[in-house]
Image (cartoon, rainbow, N blue to C red):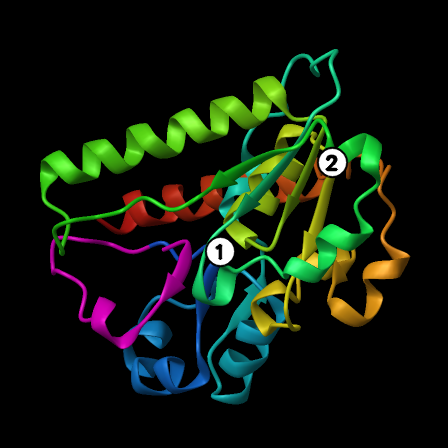
Amino acid sequence: MNGVFYNSCFPLPPAITPIFVGFHAAEDVIRQQADILRRYQPIGCRDEGTTRHMLALGIEAYTTGCLTFALPPRRQAPKEPKLLIVYGDIAGRLPLAVFRHIPEGLLVRAQLIYHRFHASRFPLDEEMRREAEAYEAALFDRYRREATLVLTPLHHVAAPCMAFGIPTIVCRERDDIRFSFLKTLLPVYTPGTFDTIDWDPPAVDVGAVRASLLRVVGERLVAALRAA
């Protein structure tokens, strides 16, 4: 159970034994789903905010970060410099003001990528799930092969790119509790701080986070199998 969840995601089918790692939900969702969360506690949360909401309701919880931090680093960085500007929509819009701060040398080599899969059917049927997975895999492969720097407002782009070993800059219209763990690893810039952006950042070493995630998931899988 990794990612952002809503009340519409529950109840879970009886055939599923959930393992909560990298879980995020709003406070009202946690309150309404408290019984199932207690049943499978401790809950591994994607961010500090979700962990605080859990603990306030007496649910055992700890912060793991997003499961995509466990992805392996790329074997080789590209030789040609390229900035990939990866954006979404709604809450994932990239603030246009940041373009005024991008150094010209980076901007002339930049490419824009819209990181959203347009689903024409919901809920997704098997064919559309395969299309979505192939689309996401192709994007991740492109980031690994091409990017020497990624600029994004998207958590689900920043975390895997950091795991790949790609220098990453996160810019958003406003702060968000969903990024509270990510902010312990790198800055999350908002319009008032765009003039402080380091446009030549190092790749963040997420080795300790990766090792912790792999250990936690392994332990939870073993426990689930024993209980089955």
Say left or right for 184 vs 113.
right
Q: Estimate the x, y position of residue 97 in percent, counting from the top left.
A: 71, 61
Which image quadrant is residue 184 in?
bottom right
Say left or right for 35 vs 158.
left
Secondary structure mostly taken by the magenta-highlighted segment of the chain: loop
Where does label 1 land, which residue? 22
Q: Estimate the x, y position of residue 125 in percent, counting from the top left.
A: 9, 44
The residue closer to the viewer here, 125 or 63, is 125
Q: Residue sitting at 30 percent across and 80 percent down?
A: 33
The residue closer to the viewer here, 118 or 136, is 118
The answer to whether one can see residue 222 in this image is yes
Q: Estimate the x, y position of residue 136 in percent, counting from the top left.
A: 38, 34
The amino acid beneath tag 1 is Gly
The answer to whether one can see residue 213 in this image is no
**Residue 121: mark in rendering:** none
Q: Residue sitting at 36 percent across and 54 percent down?
A: 19
Q: Estimate the x, y position of residue 2 in percent, counting from the top left.
A: 41, 53
Span highlighted in magenta in the image: 1-18
**Residue 107: mark in rendering:** 2
Q: Is residue 5 magenta?
A: yes
User: SS of the residue at dot 1?
Assistant: loop
Of mark 1 and mark 2, the one earlier in the sequence is: 1
Which image quadrant is residue 108 in?
top right
Q: How many numbered badges does the structure rendering display?
A: 2
